[in-house]
Amino acid sequence: MISAKEIAARVEALAREIRVAFAGTDKLVVVGLLRGSFVFIADLVREIDLPLEVDFLEVSSYGNAMESSREVRVLKDLRGEIAGRDVLVVEDIVDTGFTLTHVLAFLDAKKPARLETIALLDKPSRREVEIRATWTGFEIPDEFVVGYGIDYAQRNRNLPFIGKVRFTG
C-alpha cells in the first residue's frame, strides 16, 4: 500500500515541517504512543535537528481485535515531566479518534506549554470523534493495515512498508 521509500521521504518532509514549527524551543518532548509508533518515532526523531527528549505513553483500545473497543486505557505513563514543555505526540494511526482524544486530554492535564500531534496514517472515513493530527503522513482508506510498527495480533510490525491485511476463507 505504501512503500518503505515513500515512507522515508514523507518522514523526512514531516521532520522539516516540525523543525520549523518548533524552531527555537529547548523544551521539546516527543511522546510516542506505544506500541504502534515505535518505528515511526525512531525514524522521525533522527530527522528532527532540534534538542529533544523522547518519552513513551502506552495506551490500548484494541487489544488483539480489529475493532476499537472505544475504551482507552493508559497502560504506561510518561517517565518525565511535561509541565511547561513543548510536546509532540507521535501516533501510528488515527482511526475512530477515541485514542488520540483521550491521550490529548490526559496529557493536557499535565500542563504542557504546547501540545501538537503527528500521525503516520489517518483514516478519516472511520472517524467517530472530531479530531485531526497537526501533521499527517498519509491519508488512507478504510483498510486494516500492518507494517512499519503497526500490527495485527502482535504480528507484522517489522515489515518495512505499510500493507493491507488480506483475509481468506
Image: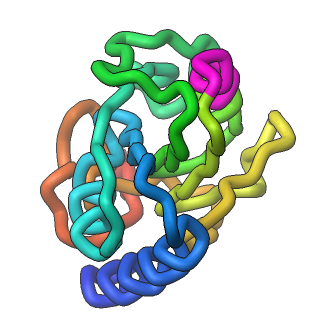
Which image quarter is the N terminus in? Answer: bottom left
Which SS does the magenta portion mostly show? helix
* The image quarter in which residue 79 lies: top left
Residue at 31% of width from left, 74% of height from top? 49
* The image quarter in which residue 155 lies: top left
From the top left corner, tell me how far across and down residue 58 is, in percent: 36, 23
For this rendering, which residue is in front, 53 or 7? Answer: 53
In the shown orientation, is residue 143 left or right of residue 15?
Answer: right
Please give the range of residues in magenta: 104-111
- Is 88 included in the stretch rendered in magenta? no
Give above or below for 63 relative to 154: above
Residue at 17% of width from left, 63% of height from top? 159
Which image quarter is the C terminus in? Answer: top left
From the top left corner, tell me how far across and down residue 127 is, in percent: 77, 44
Give above or below for 139 relative to 166: below
Residue at 29% of width from left, 75% of height from top? 47
* Residue 116 shows up from this direction: yes
Residue most extreme to the left: 158
In the shown orientation, is residue 22 left or right of residue 109?
Answer: left
Residue at 28% of width from left, 43% of height from top? 54
From the top left corner, tell me how far across and down residue 69 is, in percent: 59, 17
- Is 106 included in the stretch rendered in magenta? yes
In the shown orientation, is residue 35 left or right of residue 155?
Answer: right
* The image quarter in which residue 53 lies: top left
In the shown orientation, is residue 129 left or right of residue 24?
Answer: right
Q: How is the image coloured?
A: rainbow
* Residue 102 shows up from this direction: no
From the top left corner, tell me how far across and down residue 19 is, in percent: 47, 74
Give above or below for 125 relative to 59: below
